[in-house]
Image (cartoon, rainbow, N blue to C red):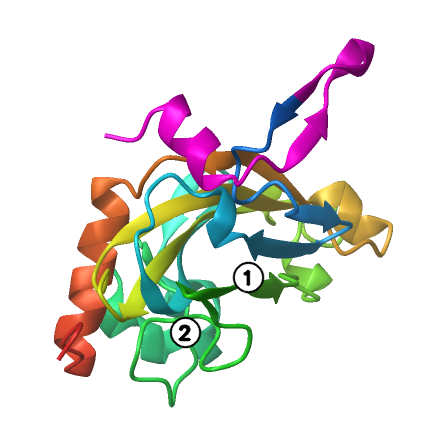
Amino acid sequence: MCNRNDAVENAKNQPNTAPGGATTPATNPNEESKTSGNRIDIVFDPDKSCKITKCDKIVNVQVIQMLVDGKPIKPGDYYDGFKYRDKTALANGSYVDHLKTETTPDYQQGVGDGKKNGSSGKATMNDTPSDSRNNLFYDATKNPTGWKEVVYKFETFAYCMKGPDCGKWYEGVTWEYKKTWEDARDGKNGVSSITDKNAPGPSQNFLDAFNKFNKEKGFVPCR
């Protein structure tokens, strides 16, 4: 199990300035990740991870669960254009975030891959969730039974897809996107926010969704 000493060693003594001017080594590989409005940028720095030995291709895998007024919903029930995702979804609606033609679970699909094997490179990705169907949201006059709140819950974890660490999970980010009926009324996109910028490892729900995606798509890790 990783501990602070491991992280400090892997951080290569890169300083962070703490309150009062003290410096401590950076130990969060996702510390550069940030949100702005409904957009999130995730940056995984392998030099600040306590889990990596060597990896030639570091990607992010993202699992999403959508909730309408607090209740999980299958992707195809939420939006007809997402019906192709239902085959990869768990009973609680969680699934690996992917497009129709994609057959591997990595979010980047070759754009923004990282590495750490001799030289290092950060794994980067961004997402901008939104729902412009404002007519589905609550309106006292036009739609009194409409949605009050939509929430997307995300787990996004760095993963070694090629190299000595292949198949290994690294640290990740948990975050959510939220849009309320007030946002819809006011023409706003909703807001993305990070709930944990240094999650130690994926949940069992995440792993179940990952395994189901792989089974449905015929993807065998590290083959």
In the image, which residues are magenta?
1-23
At 29% from the left and 70% from the top, the residue drawn is 161
Asked which secondary structure carries label 2, the reply is loop
Where the N terminus falls, by quadrant? top left
**53 horizontally vs 34: left or right:** left
Q: Name the residue under label 2.
A: 98
Which is more N-terminal, label 1 or label 2?
2
At 34% from the left and 24% from the top, the residue drawn is 3
Give the vertical position of 206 relative to 70 (above or below): below
Give the vertical position of 118 relative to 142 (above or below): below
Q: Name the residue under label 1.
A: 122
At 29% from the left and 84% from the top, the residue drawn is 103
Residue 104, label in figure: none
Where the C terminus falls, by quadrant? bottom left
Q: 14 and 100: which one is in front?
A: 14
**Image quarter of residue 167:** bottom left
